[in-house]
Amino acid sequence: MSDVWLNTLITNTPQEGFELAITLSRRGVKYTQPNPETLKALRPEYANSADGLTAASHVIAVNFQTVAAANNYWRKG
C-alpha cells in the first residue's frame, strides 16, 4: 500500500482517537493480509471466536493507548 492516509495521530476528542485506533487496527490487518478474498474467508472463524475477538480488542486498545499518548491524553495545557 503506497497511499498516504495517516498524516497525524492528533485528534480533537477521545472518541475520534478511539475511531482512529480502530482504523489503525483494521489497516494493520490489511497490510498483513492484503488478499481480500482470504480476509473474507477467514472472517467467520475469528468473528465467532472469543479468543479472536479478545485479541482484536487488545490490538485496538494498544493502538488507542498510542493515540492517547500522542494527544497528551486530551489534556489542555
Image: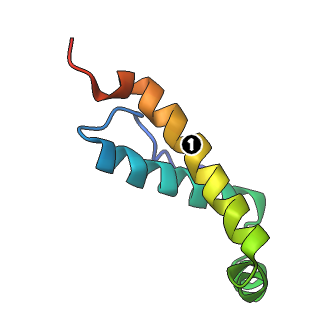
Question: Tag 1: Cα neighbours inside 10 Å, few (<14), some, or many (≥20)?
Answer: many
Whether residue 1 is visible here, answered yes or no, is no
**Quick check: 59 above or below 33?**
above
Q: Identify the residue at image location x=49%, y=56%.
A: 23
Q: Identify the residue at image location x=32%, y=42%.
A: 14
Q: Is residue 48 left or right of residue 10?
A: right
- Colour scheme of the picture: rainbow
Q: Identify the residue at image location x=57%, y=52%.
A: 60
Q: Is residue 25 left or right of residue 64?
A: right
**40 or 75: which is nearer to us?**
75
Question: Which quadrant, please, contains the C terminus?
Answer: top left
Q: Identify the residue at image location x=50%, y=56%.
A: 22
**69 or 29: which is nearer to us?**
69
How many marks on residues? 1
**31 or 41: which is nearer to us?**
41
Question: Which quadrant, please, contains the N terminus?
Answer: bottom right
Which percent across, then down, holds residue 3?
Answer: 52, 50
**39 or 69: which is nearer to us?**
69
Which percent across, then down, holds residue 46?
Answer: 75, 78
- What amino acid is found at the position of numbered circle 1 in the picture? Asn
Whether residue 55 is visible here, answered yes or no, is yes
Which percent across, then down, holds residue 28?
Answer: 66, 54
For label 1, the SS is helix
**Quick check: 25 above or below 54?**
above
> Given the current orientation, which residue lies at the most extreme front position?
50
Residue 13 quadrant: top left
Which percent across, then down, holds residue 33?
Answer: 77, 65
Q: Which residue is mark 1?
A: 63
**Quick check: 56 above or below 49?**
above
